[in-house]
Structure formats: C-alpha cells, structure tokens
Image: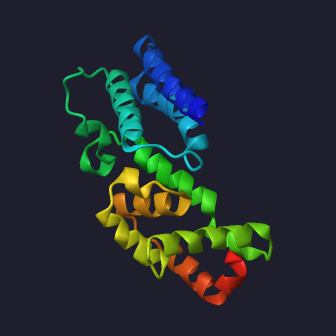
Amino acid sequence: MSATREIVHEKASMARILIKSHPLTPEVSAELLAQKGISAFTFSAALIERSQSELEGLQKIRVQANKKAWHAPWSSANSLYTFPTAEGGHECHLPSGVLLQALLQHVQVDECMRHENVVKINVLAQSTRTLTEWHCNSCTDLIDVMELWNWNLANKDFWSRLAKSLHSQKVSVTGAEKIDKKLDLIDVAFITS
C-alpha cells in the first residue's frame, strides 16, 4: 500500500513539473493536470487509507500546479483554485472531492444489493460491523457522528471513510437511507456469523 501512496504522490508531483514547462493554454493545462495528476489517485482512492496530512499534501501539490497552469504567482490565494466556478473560482479537483467520488463509485449501493451473492453479504457485513463499532443505528447516524471525529480517527475502514467524506463535503445522501432500508430487511445475525 505504501508503494501505491508513493506512486500517487510522484505522479502528482510529475504533473506539476510537466505543467511548469509546457506551453499550453490555462484551460488545456488544467485538463492535462487532471488527467495526469489525479488519475492515479482516483484509481486507488477508495481502497487505500490516507491520513489527513497525505490528503493535504496532495491538495497542496494540486493547487500549486493549478497556479502554474493559470500563470499565477505562488503568492496568490489558494481559494481562487478551490472555489467552484459558480463562485468565481477555478474549481480544481481536490483530493477530498475525488476521494468521495471514488468511495461512492466503489460502493454502488444499487449494484451491490441487486443480487443475492457474496458481494451483497460482504457489503452488508462490513457496514454492520462499522455501525456496531461506532455505536450507530443507521448509516445516516454514522454520517452525523462523523462531525465529532477528525479524519485520522474516522479513517478506520471503508464505511467510516465514506461517512466522514460525506459529512466533510456536506453531501446529503439518499444512499445512506437506501442502505439503512436494506439493513433492516437483512438478518444481521446471519451476516455476522
């Protein structure tokens, strides 16, 4: 896992260096950066635990590269590159948002729950274990509880990472309600045994 972390960091750094020496327009440079610098992170984001400092380091590289793509001085405000375009920013893809998208794609609640198979049993067993560990009755409760915990403490397993990401990105989720309904229909004793 640490090798994957190093590769992700190296690719992000290489994309930043590539942007420095490439004579592209700012829009094309930003797109190139998204393809080269974020793709490796997206691939492994849902599966590998990352600390808050790792995510902040990747965000720093990403913002620096966007400044370079837009020919802005290093001293310019970072918020210009993190704000959405609707609010006047350039809305670069930050690691926290990419992580949330990867986690949501990985779980695909409807796909996991469609068939009676090992995937469904594992998904439900993992979510049940996480709910029990955090002393929550539902996935919605788990998302609310994450307000109390910092990233490094909430980063225990896939479901707690997903809940913390949903809470930190302030995403309202109907998927949590779907999972709660599915869990209500399943015999939890059967899953955890």
| Residue 124 higher or lower than 47, as above or below | below
Tell me what residue is drawn at x 49 percent, y 49 percent.
99
**In the figure, residue 92 lies in which quadrant?**
top left
Depth check: give the residue in front, 80 or 158.
Answer: 158
Depth check: give the residue in front, 179 or 142.
Answer: 142
Taking the image as shown, residue 147 lies to the left or right of residue 43, namely left
| Residue 186 higher or lower than 26, as above or below | below
Residue 112 in the image, given as x and y percentages of width and height: 70, 69
Taking the image as shown, residue 118 lies to the left or right of residue 17, namely right
Residue 173 in the image, given as x and y percentages of width and height: 46, 71
Tell me what residue is drawn at x 67 percent, y 84 percent.
189
Tell me what residue is drawn at x 51 percent, y 46 percent.
49
Residue 143 in the image, given as x and y percentages of width and height: 41, 70
Colouring rule applied to residues = rainbow
| Residue 158 higher or lower than 84, as above or below | below
Report the number of discs: 0
**In the figure, residue 91 lies in which quadrant?**
top left
Quarter of the image with the C terminus in it: bottom right
Depth check: give the residue in front, 14 or 20.
Answer: 14
In this view, which residue lies farthest toward the top?
Answer: 21
Quarter of the image with the N terminus in it: top right
In this view, which residue lies farthest toward the front?
Answer: 193
**In the figure, residue 154 lies in which quadrant?**
bottom left
Residue 153 in the image, given as x and y percentages of width and height: 39, 55
Tell me what residue is drawn at x 56 percent, y 33 percent.
2
